[in-house]
Image (cartoon, rainbow, N blue to C red):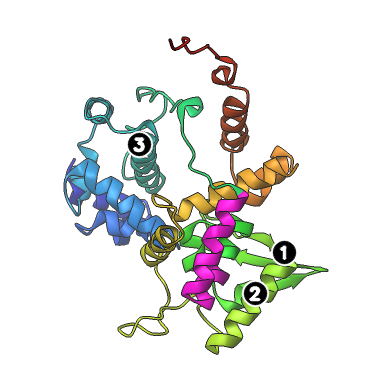
Amino acid sequence: MSADNQIQRTNESGNSQLAAGVASERLIDTYLLKFDRPATRRAYRSDLVHFFGLQEVSLEMAQRVSFVAINQYIAQLEADGSKAATIRRRVAAIRGFYDWLQALGAIENNPAHRQLIRRVKPARTKDRVLVVLTGIQANQLLLAAAEASVRNHAMMLTMLHCVLRRSEVASMDVEHIRPLGKYWIIDLPYTKGGADQYVKIPDHVVDVIEAHKEHYGIATGPLWRSLSKRNTGGRLTPTSIYRIVRATAVAAGLPGIGAHTLRHTGCTLAIEAGATLQQVQSHARHKQIETTMAYVHQRDRLRDSAADYIHFDSPDED
């Protein structure tokens, strides 16, 4: 059945949404309108474009996709050496796209239904290496940040204590920081997972943020702003934050450190200080406790390694 016939049939059944949303050749753009976060739209667009091999698809093109084609796509990703997490994310994007078409009545069955798609083997968490800083190294980084600017110090201190993703840091506004009872929190309206969330800020971090605002004369709007001549006062992007952390780490003698390292470090230092897995899971907003457990597994694997028990005597020299 052609796209025009499908739309005509849907119109006759009274589904005006399908006629308005699917009649165009820009099916992906229409689907992405359901997501609020720009980062989410970019990620889903990238995955769908990768699957279809086109920037846009029509309803007729989407209807031609079978579960066999999706399984072949997964097999090709595996053969190309794609990470399991990447494959699962791409399949989830495809499944969500076809769930939407099915909800509109444009297709009868979802070709990406879990019962039709081959299982992607989960990544082996035990072999995953998390780059983390010691407490001393974290202090080195913060000292280098303070030498660079008031902004860099305040931002990285916040990232460490609040274990924030760089996208969350970039989207922070002054208005997102507020008291909740006797505590201070950061509202995270655009965080990973979609739902509005918040995270506690220690009082001393709030003081540093207030000093940052006063230093740069920031009263409303973006909290972390560019200091470059080309874009003074503009909101920092996630890419800019990544570069700032990398450059600061190099200055501190800690090359190879990225923005996500601060998140890993905050979680690890909390566990080392006695925080429970559930406390760290909540603070980091991990959906699965297994994600949080990775920090404990790595610590225990290194702390209790058999390598520390291997000793041998050097041969006597004549």
Name which of mark 3 and mark 2 comes first in the sequence: 3
Crowd class of label 2 (few under 14; some 14 to 19; many from 20; radius 10 Å): some
What number is the disc on residue 208? 2
Which residues are drawn in magenta?
A: 135-155
Q: Is mark 1 on a helix, strand or loop?
A: loop
Q: Main secondary structure of the magenta part?
A: helix
For marks 3 and 2, give the one nearer the viewer. 2
What number is the disc on residue 202? 1
Residue at 55% over, 63% down = 142
Compute the Cα span from label 3 to label 1: 39 Å
Outermost residue, front side = 318
Q: Is mark 2 on a helix, strand or loop?
A: helix
Name which of mark 1 and mark 2 comes first in the sequence: 1
Is 297 colored magenta in this rendering? no
Q: Is mark 3 on a helix, strand or loop?
A: helix
Q: Which of 19 and 68 is in front in this view?
A: 68
The three-letter code of the residue at mark 1 reads: Pro
* x then y, percent, for residue 305: 58, 21
Q: Is residue 12 shown to the viewer in this render?
A: no
The answer to whether residue 263 is left or right of residue 12 is right
Compute the Cα span from label 1 to label 2: 10 Å
The three-letter code of the residue at mark 3 reads: Val
Circles 3 and 2, Cβ within 8 Å, touching? The answer is no
Outermost residue, bottom side = 217
For marks 3 and 1, give the one nearer the viewer. 1
Q: In which quarter of the image is the N terminus?
A: top left
